[in-house]
Image (cartoon, helix red, strand yellow):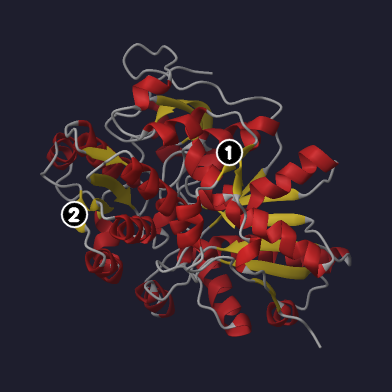
Amino acid sequence: MQHRKILLTENDIPDHWYNIVADMPNKPLPPLHPGTKEPIGPEALAPLFPMELIKQEVSADKWVSIPDPVRDVYTLWRPTPLYRAYGLEKALDTPARIYYKYEGLSPAGSHKPNTAVPQAYYNKMEGVKRITTETGAGQWGSALSFACNHFGIECEVYMVKISYEQKPYRKFMMNTWGATVHSSPTDHTNAGRQILAGDPNSPGSLGIAISEAMERAATDDNTKYALGSVLNHVLMHQTIIGLEAVKQMEMAGEMPDVVVAPFGGGSNFAGIAFPFLRLNFDEGKTIRCVASEPSSCPKLTRGVFRYDFGDTVGMTPLLPMYTLGHNFVPAPIHAGGLRYHGAGVIVSQLLKDQLIEARAHDQLECFEAGVAFAKAEGIIPAPEASHALATVFAEAQAAKEEGKPRTILFNLCGHGHFDLKAYDDYFSGRLVKHEVTSADIENSLAMLDTPLI
C-alpha cells in the first residue's frame, strides 16, 4: 500500500522555534534610522511592537521557546499533514518523488496563523488594546483577525485595494472575526491621502498599506502594529512548518534534495526552508532551497541588494534587502500576497551569500500548474502556492530529462477556496502573461536615495 499521508500527533508539535540567525555565516546588517541613517537599537521599535517581539527580532539564540498558550491554539490545526504527491508524480511522468506540507487546514486557510497567534498573544500580555496591520490577498489579515479575536484584541486591517475588490470573501472572514477592514489607500491617514493625491485610482500595494497601518499605530498609545512577513521574528515563528516537516520526512525514510516555497516577503519560504538549511549548517547536507516569486514582482531575481524602506511612504527603518524600490507598485496579479517590493533581511542575506536560490514565474504558468495539481491531488491551491508548483514542475521535468530521481518538498501554504475569481479569470482568458520591464525596474530604483551597501 502506498502511504500518501504522513501524520504527527499533538505531542509532536515543536516547543521551540528555530532562529536561523544563530547559524548564518554572515549575520544580517543592522537596520538604519530613516532620518539619521545611523544604526538603530531595539528601543526604536518600541512604539510599534511589544517588547517580547522586539527581543525576538534582535535575538541570536538558536532556539526560542513557544509559550504554552500559543501551542494550545496551534493544536486547533497543528501538526499539519505531509503528503506524498503520487497523483502529481504520475501526471508529470517524472522519476522525482514529490512531497508537500499542507498548511491550508488552519482556521484562516493558510500558514499565516503560525505567526498571527504568537503576535496577538505577546500583545495581549502587554495590555495592548488594538492591533493594526496590512494585508495583500487577505490571508494575513484573516489570520490576525482570528488571532486577535481569540485573545480579545481589536483588529484594524488595511487591505490592498485591488485585493479588496478581487477577494471580498476574505474581507467577510475578517469581519466575521470582528475586524475592521479598509480598502487601501484610504483618506483616513496622511500616507493614504498622499498616495491618493498622486493617483486617485491607485490599485494599492503592500508598501502603501504598511504605511497606513504603521501611521495608525504610531499615533495611538493603545495601538500596536503587526507584520505578516519580512521581519526576523515573523520568519522565526513560521519555522514550525519546517520543523514538523523534517520529522515527517524522516518518518518517510528520506530527505528532500530540494525544498520549494512561494516568496512574497519571506515568511512562507522561511517557514519550510530554514529548518532544512539548519541541516546544511549542522550536518553538512546539501539541500537546495528555492524561493518562487512572480515575474511581475521579481525582487530576488531582478532586484538590487541595498538599504530600502519596508513601506512606500518611508516610515519604517531602512532595511538591507533585495528590493525593486519602495515606490514600486506591482501589476494587479491575483497572487496578492506576493506583490511586495522587498525581501526580508535574513532571506536577502542568505541569497547574497548564495545559500539559497530564487526563480520567477509568470501568472499563466502558475495557474496552469495550479490547475494540474488540483486535478492530480484534489486540493485547489491559492495563487501564491501555485508559484511554488511552477518551480516544482520545472524540477520534476529536469529530473525526467536527466533520468535521475530527486526528492522535492514544497509548501502548499494555503487553499484557493476564496480565490476562485482568479481561476475564473484564468479559464475565461482574462489573465495575461505579465513580466515587469527592465525600464520599470530601473525607473523605480532610480528614485531611491537610500544608502548603498
Which amino acid, by three-letter code, is at mark 1? Val
Q: Give the number of the disc on residue 347.
A: 1
- Position of 173 with respect to 84 (left or right) is left
Task: Say which of 196 and 225 sits in front.
Answer: 225
Task: Say which of 183 and 63 sits in front.
Answer: 63
Which amino acid, by three-letter code, is at mark 2? His
Estimate the spatial distance between the alpha carbons at disc 1 and disc 2, rounded to whole Å. 30 Å
Q: Residue furthest front?
A: 68
- Position of 302 with respect to 280 (left or right) is left
Q: Quadrant of residue 332?
A: bottom left
| Residue marked by disc 2 | 182
Label 2 Cα crowd, 10 Å radius (few <14 / some 14-19 / many 20+): some
Compared with 83, 337 (above or below) is above
Q: Quadrant of the N terminus?
A: bottom right
Could you tell me if residue 447 is visible in this image?
Answer: no
Q: Secondary structure at mark 1?
A: helix
Residue found at x 26% / y 49%? 204
Q: Residue furthest bottom?
A: 1
Q: Earlier in the sequence, mark 1 or mark 2?
A: 2
